[in-house]
Amino acid sequence: MKKEESKKRKFGILYLILICLVILAVIYYLQSTMAQYRSAGTGTGTAEVALWNVSFSGDNSTWSDTYNMTFAPSSSANVVAGKIAPSLTATGTGYIDLTGTETAVDFTVTIGDLPTELAGANFTVTGVTASNSHGSISMAKTGSSYTGSISLPSSTTAMGSGEKVTFVVTVQWDNDSDEGVTDTSIGETLTQIEIPVNVTAVQKQ
């Protein structure tokens, strides 16, 4: 009886050992069949940034976000040179330097509110024109803003050296309709008329 139990115990142990060996063999086989070549790498991609090189300037004016442009009145034998009076026009000139810029550019010239002292006078901004070395630039008017565009010379070429937009703001002072009362008041109280001009330039989409 004891011999039979001993045989059963030995057989059970051998059976467990055999099962373990089979499991190990299966694991080894699976590992070997799943092995494969593998490579990994890391790197950095680069994209060159288009140069934005836009600056503003004006004749006899200091630029900021908004500046008061100095206007040159038309000449008249009856008005001291450099002064504006009823029936005269005046022009203010500004510049946008685009040298080296590597994108097309949209620019906008916006005329701010005229001084309250001009209320009642026929003093108006009659328009904004622009040009560059290639000729005149079409300006689209929306309210008190005038917008134009400058294209690149080609898809592979930046704006050339000295590429500059010249824009001109024109104002007109017509005689008033109240027998000169308003115009006379302006002439008596103001030594200059400040006209805020705001200029912005953005990448053309």
Image (cartoon, helix red, strand yellow):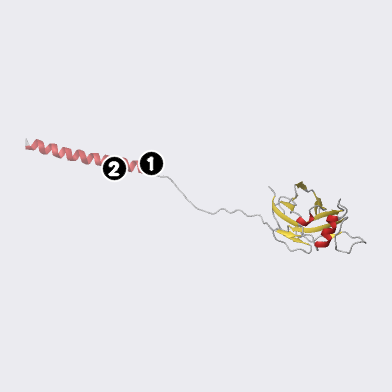
Instruction: Look at the numbered disc 1 and give the secondary structure of its residue.
Output: helix
Residue 148: image location, x then y, percent: 76, 50
Dot label at residue 86: none
Identity of the amino acid at label 2?
Leu
Question: Residue tagged by mark 2?
Answer: 24
Q: How many marks?
A: 2
Residue at the image position 76 percent from the left and 55 percent from the top = 116
| Residue occupying the point 34% across, 41% down | 29
Upstream in the sequence, badge 2 or badge 1? Answer: 2
User: Residue 192 location, x and y as percent?
Assistant: 80, 62
Label 2: few (<14), some (14–19) or many (≥20) C-alpha neighbours in 10 Å: few
Amino acid carrying label 1: it is Thr
Q: Is residue 34 left or right of residue 77?
A: left
Is residue 137 placed above or below 194 in the rendered structure?
A: above
Identify which residue, 125 or 185, lies in the foreground.
185
Residue matched to label 1:
33
Residue 11, x across and y down, in percent? 16, 37
What's the residue at 8%, 37% (across, down)?
Answer: 3
For residue 94, which quarter of the picture? bottom right
- Above or below, comparing residue 14 to residue 106 in the picture: above
Based on the displayed image, in which of its 4 quarters is residue 7 positioned?
top left
Neighbours of disc 1 within 10 Å: few (<14), some (14-19), many (20+): few
Can see residue 8? Answer: yes
Find residue 93 and report its horizontal and vertical position in percent: 80, 58
Apparent side of residue 77 relative to residue 60 in the rendered image (left or right): right
Residue 159 seen in this snapshot: no
Q: In front: 17, or 43? A: 43
